Amino acid sequence: MTNIRSGVENPHPHELPHCQALLGGTDWASLATVRRTGESLPTALARILNPDPVVRAAATDEALREVTHQNTIYEATVPVALYVAAILHHPAIAVDDFGHDADIPPHRPTVVRLLEWLSDTAYDADDECVAIGERHFGRDFLDKDGEMRAFRDWRPAIFSAVHPLLGHDSAEVRDAAFIAAIPLAEHPVLTAHRAELLDHARALLATSTNRYHRDRVLGAMKAWGHDTSDLENADDIAAQERYARFKVERDSWWAADGAGGYSEDPPF
């Protein structure tokens, strides 16, 4: 089928298109981004594969900035996400970032930056976001939000690119891939992967002090019906209490306006 809102043909939603097909076959100029349309995106996206890590980093920031603002899925988000997933294993991404040249200052691996963006985007379209949307805008919320629906439809294809990185030599990459895999695995055809993800979850909770990672992992395990009490520490419990208070405050702000707006600035 063709997703008109994203401009991406989707005849096989579990198969990831080739990155060059996405660059050349997407009508970028017709797709909305944060500030304008996406006519500059093909150039920026192509430069992410530049051999120079400095050029790669700048191009990554430039491209992703165009579709990153206030947890919104834009018309251009889906083809950008598919392109990002399609280049995760490109030699310029998979090899050059992990060289150890004493004459080159250390830099953050592009693959980690790309995985983190995929993760953030997947969480912006996860089941909890849909539930919140339906609660405030009606049961047909997802029918009206074609961009979010399109991203959710493509989750199996994106997961297929993220999954191999769960076994990467770098712990930083493995963790970034795992955090991205969690919301993607909410898709019904991916539930069989949850047992594997649980093994990664327990390993991460045994070693990581990263607050964001721990929150995401514990939340996923609970959503999947697993008792996490023996895996939680005092910091985890305190963070959950803070988040529970935030949810109460957030819901009260939503309730202040029946249309889902705010009568004044919300407390977040």
Image (cartoon, grey):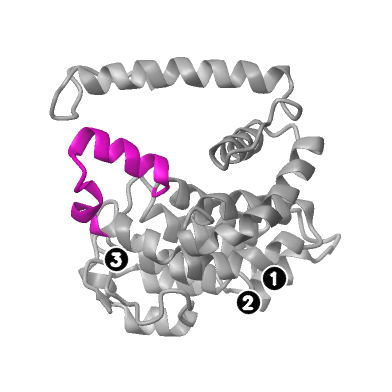
Answer left or right for 93 relative to 98: left
Q: Is residue 39 depicted above or below 143 in this figure?
A: below
Instruction: Report the Cα–Cα distance between label 3 and label 2.
Output: 23 Å
Q: Which of the two labelled residues, at mark 3 and mark 1, occupies the earlier sequence position?
A: 3
Question: Is residue 108 in view from this perspective?
Answer: no
Main secondary structure found in the magenta portion: helix
The residue at which mark 3 appears reads as 38
Which residue occupies 38% across, 69% down? 79
What residue span does the magenta drawing correspond to?
125-146
Instruction: Report the Cα–Cα distance between label 3 and label 1.
Output: 26 Å
Are dots 1 and 2 in contact, CB under 8 Å?
yes
Q: Closer to the camera, 67 or 59?
A: 67
Question: Is residue 45 in view from this perspective?
Answer: yes
Which residue occupies 70% across, 25% down? 229
Is 142 colored magenta in this rendering? yes
**SS type, badge 3:** loop
- Where's the C terminus, which quadrant? top left
Q: What is the crowding at mark 2: few (fewer than 14 residues within 10 Å), some, or many (at least 20)?
A: some
Q: Closer to the camera, 175 or 104?
A: 175
Identify the disc placed on residue 57: none
Q: Which of the two labelled residues, at mark 3 and mark 2, occupies the earlier sequence position?
A: 3
Identify the disc placed on residue 90: 2
Query: Disc 3 marks which amino acid?
Result: Gly
The residue at which mark 1 appears reads as 94
Q: Is residue 260 depicted above or below 198 in this figure?
A: above
